[in-house]
Amino acid sequence: MSQDLTAVIPTLLAQGLVSLRQRAIMPRLVSRAFELAPGVRGSTVNVPIASAVPATDVSPGATHAGGTDIHPTSVAVACDQWKEAAFVLSDKEVLESIEGTIPMQANEAIKSLANAVDAHIWSFYKGVYGFVGTAGTTPFAADVTGFTSARKVMARQLTDVDPRYFVMDPDAEANALALAAFRDIGQSGDSGLISDGVIGRKYGATWLMSQNVPTHTAGTITTGLIAKSGTAVAAGLKTMVATTAVSTGACALLTGDILAIAGHTTTYAVSAIATQASAASDVTITFTPGLEKALAGSEAITVKGSHVVNMAFHRDAFAFATRPLETTGAGLGNFQSAVDPVSGIVLRLEVERQNKRTRWSYDILYGAQIIRPEFAVRVAG
C-alpha cells in the first residue's frame, strides 16, 4: 500500500493545485510572493513595493549628475492562516486518481480551501475608501455607469493603469451580461460573451465573477450626523468629532462603513467602531484617508448603507503571501508540497494510514494584507 500511496501523492497534489487555481480567484489577481523555506503559522513573507522615481532636469556636463536614491520598500505579510481540508478515499477512488480523475471528495476539499483563501483576501475590503454606486442596488441594470464611475475615482486616486481587475457578484454579472454594449457583437465586436458567457477585458480592466464577493453590513445611524459645530479639523487628519443634530437616536458606526462629507469628493472608510453614548452626544470617528480639506464644523456627514462590495482594483491594492509547510513527519505519514506557478499558492498533501482506511489532507499556510487602498474602489450593489 505504501508504494501505491507514493505513486498517488504527486498526481493528487498536481490535480489539487490545478483545481485550487481555478477556484481561488483573488490570489491570481493581487500582488503575491512566496518563500521556498518551510514556515509555521505567523512566519512572514516580504512583498516588494516599487519606489517612486522622480523626473529631473538634465544638465549636460563633464561629470555625471548625482542620481536620486531609490528606496524600494516591502510589506511583511504574516502567514497567519493555516487551513486544512481532510477526507478519506476508497481504494477505487485512489485508482481513479492515478488515471487522472480527481476524486469528488478531493475536489470538495479544494473548494473549501479556495473559498477560505478568497474570503481572507476579501476581508481587507474594509480599508478601501473609494466608493461609487447606490448601496442596496445592483449595478449595470441599464448601463456601465457603475464601472465608468469607478474608473473616474481610480483616476482621482492616481491608481496605476495596468493591470486592473473588476470582480463582481453573480447578480451584478447577470445584469452586465444582458447589456447591449457587451452582448451585441455589433457594439462589442466580441463574440466571446455569447459563446462562453465571459465578459473578459473591457474598459481597461478584466471583468470576473466570484461567488465570494462579500456584503458589508453597515452600522446604525439616525439622520442628521454632522461634524461637531464650531470645531475645526485640519486637512490631512484622520479623526474628527461628530454628533447627531437631533435627539431621536444615536450613531453606531462599524469598521468599513463609508462616509461622505458635504463638499468633499473623497469618501472615507471608518477604521474603528464609533458609538455615541446617547442621542445628540459627541462621537469620535477615526477614518482613512486623511481629510481632503479642512472642516469648519457642521458639515453634513452621510453614511452609506449596507452594500455588496463589488470591486475595481489594481493588482497592487492587496498582497497575498504563502509558504510551504514542513514535509517531514517523523515517519508518521507521507507528505509532499508543490507551488502553483499561476496563482503562487503552495499546497501540501499529507497521507496517513489509519485503522482500515487512508486519510488524505490538503493544507495551506498563507496570509494577506491591504497595501495600497488608493488602488481600489467599491462598486456598491
Image: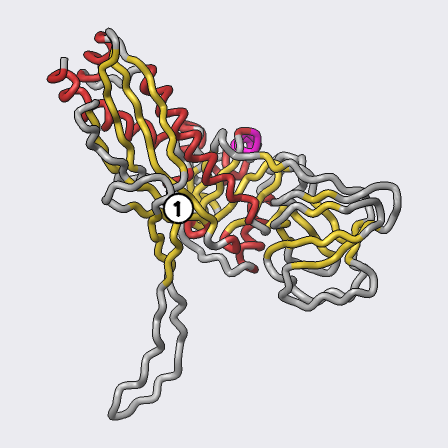
Residue 120 image point, x, y percent: 46, 37
Q: Which residue is mark 1?
A: 78
Image quadrant where residue 180 sits: top right
Most extreme residue toward the left, as rendered?
Answer: 3
Image quadrant where residue 351 sits: top left
Residue 49 image point, x, y percent: 38, 58
Residue 303 image point, x, y percent: 71, 46
What amino acid is found at the position of numbered circle 1 in the picture? Ala
Q: Is residue 146 above or below residue 141?
A: below
Q: Give the position of the C terminus as an image quadrant.
A: top right
Q: Is residue 191 visible?
A: no
Residue 191 in magenta? no
* Left or right of 221 in this view: 84: left
- Please report the residue visible at 28 percent of the width from the left and 92 percent of the height from the top: 61
Residue 104 image point, x, y percent: 33, 15
- Please report the residue visible at 49 percent of the width from the left and 31 percent of the height from the top: 212
* Left or right of 214 in this view: 356: left
- Secondary element type, mark 1: strand
Q: Is residue 308 above or below residue 377?
A: above
Q: Is residue 197 visible?
A: yes
* Left or right of 364 in this view: 333: left
Q: Is residue 152 above or below residue 254?
A: below
Most extreme residue toward the right, as rendered?
Answer: 247
Q: Nearer the viewer, residue 232 or 175?
A: 232
Q: Main secondary structure of the magenta part?
A: helix
Most extreme residue toward the bottom, as rendered?
Answer: 62
The stretch of residues the image draws in magenta is 171-178
- Please report the residue visible at 37 percent of the width from the left and 62 percent of the height from the top: 73
* Left or right of 283 in this view: 307: left
- Please report the residue visible at 36 percent of the width from the left and 39 percent of the height from the top: 41
Residue 175 in magenta? yes
Few, some or many residues within 10 Å of mark 1 (<14, 14–19, 20+): many
